[in-house]
Amino acid sequence: MSTWWWAAAFLTGLAGSLHCVGMCGPLAMALPLGRLPQHQRPWGLLTYQLGRLSAYGLLGAVVGLVGQGLWLVNLQGPVSIGSGLLLLIWGFSGRAHGGVASSLTHRLGLSVLMARLLTQPRLGAFLGLGFLNGLLPCGLIYTALTGTLVSASPLAGMTYMLLFGLGTLPALVGIRTLTAYLTVPLRQRLTRALPVATILVGVLLLIRGLSVYPHWIDKAAPDKPIPVCHG
């Protein structure tokens, strides 16, 4: 995968990070950091973020494995084009906010587990909270995973999602400062960054799919006769 594709992963996370502040901000603010000893509080925040990135990496590896299978059966081109069109429709329709996240979270039982971990002020609980947070249904993660689908290996998929996660770090690490300045109307306007990121990834998927179009068409075509040179 090219350098611009890796950059797209990071920029998707960066562009959608303000959406993360609105969606995951309350959880980050609820972390019981104040119940940790003073010297452990930075480690608690770091452990939480490491858990979240680990979940992203795991999801990326799984989807990357699916992408590898698509590559082996020569379907990456059409899947990339189809995924790009789907993201464009999703982004322009304004439904890329993940509004069903709350009900899905309850159905998966994640809210119960997270509520228990919030009562346990220890580093292992922070790691678990971060990991479960990374598994929460989220429109931004769906967008990133769609981009991961065209990767050709679990390692590439994991790398893509880790870069995406790193893009979300600045906003989520500085969330306590950001929330002091972000009013509710401003947060609602900033969530529009998610459809923009969705459309961006959709365009990139279309470009990627069309760029390999001749390749997968040629491979699907019948074998051409091999010319014989008569000396």
Image (cartoon, grey):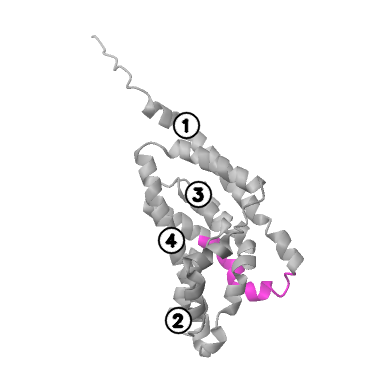
Along the polypeptide, which appears first: circle 2 or circle 4?
Answer: 4
Where residue 215 appears, as percent x and y from the top left, is 42, 31
Q: How many other residues sit within 10 Å of disc 2, few (<14), some (14-19) or many (≥20)?
A: some
Along the polypeptide, which appears first: circle 2 or circle 3?
Answer: 2
CA separation in Å, label 2 and label 4: 20 Å
Q: In which quarter of the image is the C terminus?
A: top left
Along the polypeptide, which appears first: circle 1 or circle 3?
Answer: 3
Along the polypeptide, which appears first: circle 4 or circle 1?
Answer: 4
Q: Residue at position x 63%, y 72% from top?
A: 175
Residue 222, picture quadrant? top left
What residue would you read off at disc 3? 146
Work out whether residue 26 or residue 3 is closer to the camera in this orientation and state it: 26
Work out whether residue 26 or residue 166 is closer to the camera in this orientation and state it: 26
Q: Residue at position x 71%, y 65% from top?
A: 187
What residue would you read off at disc 1? 213
Q: How many other residues sit within 10 Å of disc 3, few (<14), some (14-19) or many (≥20)?
A: many
Along the polypeptide, which appears first: circle 1 or circle 2?
Answer: 2
Amino acid under disc 2: Leu
Amino acid under disc 1: Tyr
Prevailing secondary structure of the magenta residues: helix
Q: Can residue 212 be seen in this view?
A: yes
Q: What stretch is highlighted in magenta?
A: 165-183
CA separation in Å, label 1 and label 2: 49 Å
The answer to whether 230 is drawn above or below residue 180 in the figure is above
Residue 174, picture quadrant? bottom right
